[in-house]
Image (cartoon, rainbow, N blue to C red):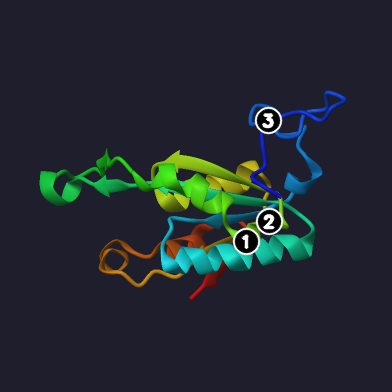
């Protein structure tokens, strides 16, 4: 099965509309949400999440959040200020995901957002009333300085969070 499309059944019943959360495809009533940025850890998280969605008989919502860098580091501002950084990777993600073998057995959609990664992933999970959030563990220097996405989600998310090493 390829990427899930925003379209209607032949009888006119809506499959999935962001503006009408109560008229969704049954596969996306309680999907699994996974954070994905193309890194090795997010690839492992995606593989686990697709298997989890398949076992649960639901859909998979893949969330890609565009980069935002805190400007307070170089601007000396007290309140948090963020600068949007163009994310050239997001254009290639759809094609990469469409060719992924482990996504062929599960209905999925790609949701792209901009902002704080933890807030956006949790926001998407809330919008879709997700059963769980799956993320890859962070090992980079930035996660040590600003805090890991996985740790922040585990502390603040309102639903189960699975962290894949």
Mark 2, secondary structure of its residue:
loop
* Above/below status of 27 relative to 135: above
Residue receiving disc 1 = 101
User: What residue do we see at 77% from left, 65% from top?
Assistant: 55
Mark 1–mark 3 distance (CA, rounded to whole Å): 26 Å
Mark 1, secondary structure of its residue:
helix
Mark 1–mark 2 distance (CA, rounded to whole Å): 6 Å
* Above/below status of 130 relative to 102: above
User: What residue do we see at 51% from left, 45% from top?
Assistant: 94
Report x, y in % for residue 117: 42, 51
Q: Which of marks 3 and 2 is nearer the N terminus?
A: 3
Q: Which of marks 1 and 3 is nearer the N terminus?
A: 3
User: What residue do we see at 16% from left, 51% from top?
Assistant: 73
> Is residue 160 in view?
no
Looking at the image, the residue that sits furthest to the right is 11
Nearer to the camera, 13 or 69: 13
Dot 2: few (<14), some (14–19), or many (≥20) neighbours within 10 Å? some
Residue receiving disc 2 = 104
Figure quadrant of residue 123? top right
Residue receiving disc 3 = 17
Q: Which of marks 1 and 3 is in front?
A: 1
Mark 3, secondary structure of its residue:
loop
Nearer to the camera, 156 or 104: 104
Q: Do the residues labelled 1 and 2 touch (CB within 8 Å)?
A: yes
* Above/below status of 33 relative to 52: above
Viewed as shown, does residue 28 lie left or right of 12? left
Mark 3–mark 2 distance (CA, rounded to whole Å): 22 Å
Looking at the image, the residue that sits furthest to the bottom is 165
Report x, y in % for residue 21: 70, 34
Viewed as shown, does residue 22 lie left or right of 156? right
């Amino acid at each position: 099965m390829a990427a899930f499309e925003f379209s209607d059944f032949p009888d006119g019943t809506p499959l999935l509309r962001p503006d009408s959360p109560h008229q969704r495809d049954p596969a996306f009533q309680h999907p699994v949400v996974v954070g994905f940025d193309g890194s090795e850890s997010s690839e492992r998280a995606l593989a686990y999440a697709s298997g989890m969605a398949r076992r649960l008989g639901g859909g998979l919502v893949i969330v890609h959040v565009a980069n935002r860098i805190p400007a307070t580091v170089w601007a000396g501002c007290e309140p948090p200020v963020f600068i949007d950084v163009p994310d050239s990777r997001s254009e290639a993600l759809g094609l990469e995901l469409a060719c992924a073998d482990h996504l062929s057995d599960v209905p999925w959609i790609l949701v792209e957002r901009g902002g704080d990664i933890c807030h956006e992933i949790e926001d998407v999970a809330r919008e879709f009333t997700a059963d769980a959030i799956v993320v890859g563990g962070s090992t980079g220097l930035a996660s040590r300085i600003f805090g890991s996405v996985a740790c922040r989600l585990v502390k603040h998310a309102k639903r189960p969070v699975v962290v894949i090493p």
